[in-house]
Image (cartoon, grey):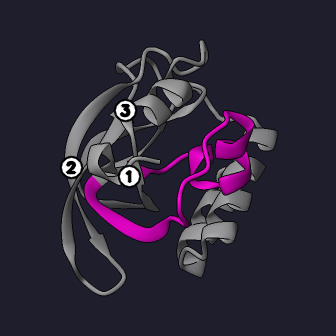
Amino acid sequence: MNDAASMPVFFYGSYMHAAVLAEHGVALAPLTSALLLDYDLHFQPLVTLAPAPGRWVWGGLGQATPDELRRLYDDPIVQDYGPVPVQVRTLTGQRMQAQTYLAPARAPVAPSPDYVQRLVAAARALGLPDVYVERLADLG
């Protein structure tokens, strides 16, 4: 990875998991846990985020190059996701500007139990707070 060209990116779905990133040929330095305020999960059927005052989403914050992001978001299943600037908070309370990727709004669709398990596995692997892992598990 070329650090000069990398940018902070907030991952909140299955891309929080290093193994899923590796499936797409992307090997980032370990992600750190981060919190995004005033958004919530929205399934259609893959997860995206929607503005939701007072809600919050945990995810992974990492550095990625434009080439790495292209490899992830050129996948046909997520190619309509686009970058959006956000401000996240790390476990130490540090606020950071980052980008995340959101899908265009569609009617909500219940996630499949298998997909929920992928999200739970990603959240556990990242070491996200138990209350958030339980919230994800309750979706399935």
Q: Which is in the foreground here, disc 1 or disc 3?
A: 3
Residue 10: numbered disc: 1
Please tell me how crowded label 3 is: few (under 14), some (14-19), or many (20+) other residues with Cα within 10 Å: few
Compared with 101, 58 (above or below) is: below
> On the rendered structure, is 124 left or right of 50?
right
Quadrant in the rendering for residue 102: top left
Q: Are marks 2 and 1 in contact (CB under 8 Å)?
A: yes
Image point 46% across, 70% down: which residue? Answer: 32
- Gap in angstroms between the C-alphas marked 2 and 1: 8 Å
Residue 6 point in image, percent of width and height: 33, 47
Left or right of 82, for residue 122: right
Residue 26, given in percent of the width and then of the height, sits at 61, 41
Q: Earlier in the sequence, mark 2 or mark 1?
A: 1
The residue tagged 2 is: 86
**Residue segment shown in magenta:** 10-38
Does residue 80 sit above or below 48 in this rendering?
Answer: above
